[in-house]
């Protein structure tokens, strides 16, 4: 080992407990905010930080600070249809994770098409919740988030009308976990650590 290197190893064992259930998919409500509304981002810890564990390397520290009057909005997804993936890309020394999602919405109403027009060339940050209740982030300060809309009217009588928003963003972490606040209005927010909606006076929603 090179004595001048300060890279810290945080490898730990990962135990798979017998009978443990892991539910696939993501929950219906997808939260989003234009990155232009974000004043300050939470940060990923570094391996050299004090008291950092292997699991903590995947957890953002801090909250999203938004500009005055800016809040997260939501897109309700089709049940049991959307998914999130990540893959590793790049050359040794500069590899990144390619985080992607297919956010599928039922219908092609004007509001959905209006959202598609805006997001087509914009740069958004998304927060989704997996089946276990954990919140994870698609988007960061370093790379642009690409959102590509597609729609399908269906054909047969039993077909489905749907709109799909393909989300893609590079990140140094695979879909990092978020445990901070998700501001919904001037007085309400979701505590991502608990999944509960709270008010600024501390009352649960």
Image: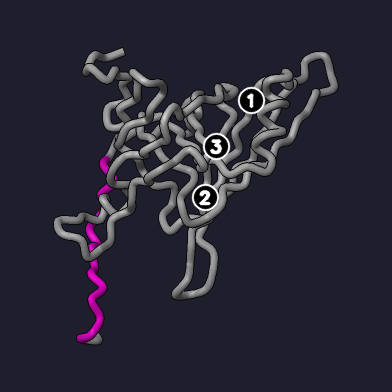
Residue 16: % across, % down? 29, 46
Q: Of tags 1 and 3, which is closer to the observer?
A: 1
> What predominant SS class does the magenta segment belong to?
loop
Of the 4 image quadrants, the one containing the C terminus is top left
Instruction: Find disc 1 in the rendering and name its residue.
Output: 105
Q: Residue furthest left?
A: 51
Pick the residue in front: 131 or 58: 58
For numbered disc 3, what is the local secondary structure? strand
> How far is mark 2 from mark 3, CA to CA?
11 Å
Judge left or right: residue 182 versus residue 73. Answer: left
Instruction: Find disc 3 in the rendering and name its residue.
Output: 83
Badge 1: residue crowd in 10 Å (few <14, some 14–19, many ≥20): many
Q: N-terminal of the two: label 2 or label 3? A: 3
> What segment is highlighted magenta in the picture?
3-17
Judge left or right: residue 35 versus residue 6. Answer: right
Was residue 13 drawn as part of the magenta stretch in this picture?
A: yes
Q: Residue furthest right?
A: 155
Residue beneath the point at 52% across and 73% down: 91
Residue 123: % across, % down? 58, 44
Looking at the image, what colour scheme do you see? Answer: one colour
* Image-quadrant location for residue 65: top left
Q: Is residue 64 above or below residue 183?
A: below
Q: Residue furthest front?
A: 68
Was residue 148 drawn as part of the magenta stretch in this picture?
A: no
Which disc is residue 58 wearing?
none
For numbered disc 1, what is the local secondary structure? strand
Instruction: Find disc 2 in the rendering and name its residue.
Output: 99
């Amino acid at each position: 080992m090179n004595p001048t290197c300060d890279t810290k190893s945080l490898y730990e064992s990962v135990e798979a407990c017998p009978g443990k259930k892991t539910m696939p998919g993501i929950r219906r409500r997808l939260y989003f905010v234009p990155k232009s509304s974000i004043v300050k981002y939470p940060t990923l810890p570094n391996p050299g930080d004090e008291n950092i564990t292997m699991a903590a390397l995947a957890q953002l520290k801090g909250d999203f600070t938004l500009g005055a009057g800016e809040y997260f909005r939501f897109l309700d997804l089709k049940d049991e249809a959307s998914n999130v993936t990540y893959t590793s890309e790049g050359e040794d020394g500069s590899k990144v994770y390619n985080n992607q999602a297919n956010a599928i919405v039922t219908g092609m109403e004007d509001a959905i098409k209006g959202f598609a027009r805006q997001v087509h060339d914009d740069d958004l940050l998304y927060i989704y919740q997996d089946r276990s209740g954990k919140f994870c982030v698609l988007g960061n300060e370093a790379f642009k988030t690409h959102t590509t809309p597609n729609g399908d009217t269906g054909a047969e009588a039993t077909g489905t009308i749907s709109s799909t928003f393909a989300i893609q963003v590079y990140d140094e972490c695979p879909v990092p976990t978020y445990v901070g606040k998700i501001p919904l209005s001037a007085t309400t927010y979701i505590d991502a650590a608990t999944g509960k909606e709270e008010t600024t006076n501390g009352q649960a929603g």
